[in-house]
Amino acid sequence: MGQMNRIRNFTREREDAPRGNDFHVVITVERCFYVEEEVGRKLMRLVRRRWRPRWIRFRTLEGTEVQVLSESVRSIEESTMSARERWRALQRALESEREDGEPIF
């Protein structure tokens, strides 16, 4: 019974989980991080500055606190729900093109 409660608690939606479907992806030399829209916009302003801070600290969607060297940030990308839907549609079309041999464009 105790194991089941832990699984149920783990899969239950967190109270502080972001409610929107849009987020930003912070891509560094080593890995990428998913952050809330507001955090992503703040980080974009930081990395655009002429005099950047040496370290950038932020919290991911999972709630993990991360600190990276600002020079290791390669890009910060917006990821909206509509853009992801268009990307999936393009991927499906390309996959069907490969199967049929007919170009889609």
Image: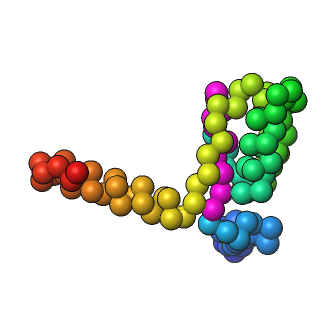
Residue 57 visible in the picture: yes
Q: Is residue 19 above or below residue 52?
A: below
| Residue 68 falls in image quadrant | top right
Residue at left 74%, top 43%? 44
Figure disc tally: 0
x then y, percent, for residue 54: 86, 26
The image shows residue 86 at horizontal and vertical percentages of 42, 60
**Residue at 65 percent of width and 57 percent of height:** 23
The part of the image, by quadrant, that contains residue 27 is top right
The residue located at (77%, 56%) in the rendering is: 38
Task: Tell me if 22 is positioned left or right of 35 in this view.
Answer: left
The magenta segment is: 22-31
Q: Residue at x 66, y 42 (%)?
A: 76
Is 27 placed left or right of 103 in the picture?
right
Quadrant into which the N terminus falls: bottom right
Q: Is residue 23 magenta?
A: yes
Q: Nearer the viewer, residue 14 or 28?
A: 28
The location of residue 10, given as percent across then percent down, is 70, 65
- Indicate whether residue 2 is drawn in magenta: no
